[in-house]
Image (cartoon, rainbow, N blue to C red):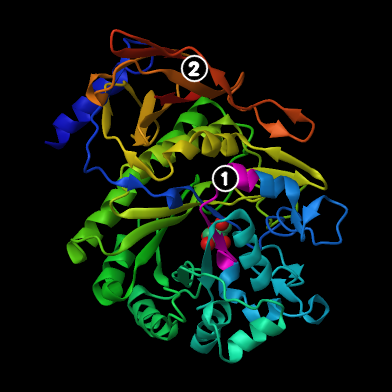
Amino acid sequence: MKNIILLAAAAAALTASAKGDAVTVTLAPNPDAPMIPKEIYGQFAEHLGTCIYGGIWVGPESSIPNTDGYRNDVLGAMRELQVPVLRWPGGCFADEYHWMDGIGPKENRPRMVNNNWGGTVEDNSFGTNEFFNLCELIGCEPYLSGNVGSGTVAELAQWVEYITAEDGPMAKLRKQNGREKPWHLKYLGVGNESWGCGGNFVPEYYANVYRRYQTYCRDFDGNHLYKIASGASDYDYNWTEVMMKNAGRLMNGISLHYYTVTGWSGSKGAATKFDTDDYYWTLGKCLEIEDVVKKHCDIMDKYDPKCNVNLLVDEWGTWWDEEPGTVPGHLYQQNTMRDAMVAALSLNVFHKFTKRVSMTNIAQFANVLQSMVLTKDDQMVLTPTYYVFKMYVPHQNAQFVPLSTNSGYRQVEGGRLVPNVSATASTKDGQYTISLVNVDLDNTQDINIPLSALGKKNMTVAGEILTCTNIDDYNDFGSEKISVAPFNGAKISNGNLTLTMPAKSIITLILK
Ligand code: AHR
């Protein structure tokens, strides 16, 4: 059997390298298909490098245009993306963060060393009030990552009380700090990477710790917490197994972290300098997330066949070497069209698993890893990844439309298969959104999409395209090479939608 699979894969790879016949995308709308929760488009902002300080928050006294201390340009970008949920304050930072240091008058807030990220001194000027007010300002759900590694149960329990209680000692403290009404808090992470920077626990021990912590994180005054256990990294299926077995009934979700990275030691490669093999390797590694998610879901199915517990991929994206000349430990990296491809392919995968996967959070919003925006002083650039998220907004809270394609594949180093064309579709309010990715660096792809299954006559189509001259093009301050443009090349005739995708392009089509 194994040989047959290998032969089939080899045959597929053979058909892949040159431009072939038109790729047919067959849509199979299903009224029972799950919704794509808007939280699949979640973001992450950690106290790391210039993600918070400089990237999102400049303080009300800054000469950089801001609203109550939040950069206006970045607020605009967050609103454009309709950011549904924002994870904070880490990451690894979360397990060293003591929330009481970040409340009250700024001049009284103690400083700390950010040990995980370059030893930078943190002045705690962005704390709980600043985070929750930001979420209210942009209309997104806050996702709080609690300190388990170096904190206490009481500390986390009191944080929840400070944020959500109408009355009592913590509410009194909040009121003294200028916030009368409680905020709303749904998503509560109980630790982060508890197998690593979050405490180096073994899963059996962490499962017990999780059980204890979640007991004391209460629902106050109509607020209802959705409790998330710190989950596995990549291929650590045993972590999911033990957690589901020992604590599954006490959680609403468990996380998974998966980075598109060459490895954890040595050079990870430059964000902007790579060859053709590196490019396709990256896409293969990115697409492997499908198998990883599936295997974690299979384990969860065993313990939770009714899907009461969700899987949250609350950190994902590319991880390259830091840009030369930037502060070590701040994880500042550029973002090319290769990163845009990773974003689109990953989102296409997540759409297929929303029965179990209810949230994902790309790392991170500003100036860290696969960012949406890069900032320098008063300037901001939108990255190619930002544009993918922008083009995919119509998929938020739309119903998934199952589909298949007959795209050829290319076999890349490590034996992974990368399709030439990846597609995803959804429907909302009578509109269909189809997103297509042509990963091929050299060849256009003719696409044919029969529309009969949609059962609608006289449909119209409009489109947007993200493409580039060179795959390593990127946007920098004063030189923006990549941005989304209208795409008018899709035609509907005799019930078929046809288009030719340029090499290395991402297209979203809206059909009405
Ligand atoms: O996103 C950067 C870091 O990656 C996070 O702090 C940590 O959780 C992960 O290892």
- The numbered dot on residue 268 is 1
Q: In the rendered image, which quarter contains the N terminus?
A: top left
Asked which secondary structure carries label 2, the reply is loop
What residue sits 51% from the left and 25% below the top?
Answer: 276
On whether residue 88 falls in the magenta region, the answer is: yes
**Residue in front for this viewpoint, 7 or 199:** 199
In the image, residue 123 lies at what x, y percent?
Answer: 77, 72
Q: CA distance from mark 1 to mark 2?
A: 26 Å
Q: Note whether residue 482 is visible.
A: yes
In the image, residue 118 lies at what x, y percent?
Answer: 70, 63
Circle 1: residue type: Lys
- Numbered-mark total: 2
In the image, residue 8 lies at what x, y percent?
Answer: 20, 26
Asked which secondary structure carries label 1, the reply is loop
Q: Which residues are magenta?
A: 77-92
Q: Find the residue positioned furthest to the bottom.
A: 169
**Residue in front for this viewpoint, 403 or 337:** 403
User: Quick check: which quadrant has ligand 1?
Assistant: bottom right
Q: Which residue is mark 2?
A: 503
Circle 2: residue type: Ala
> Dot 2, crowdedness within 10 Å: few (<14), some or many (≥20)?
many
Residue 85 in the image: above or below residue 33: below
Q: Note whether residue 419 is visible.
A: no
Residue 373 in the image: above or below residue 104: above
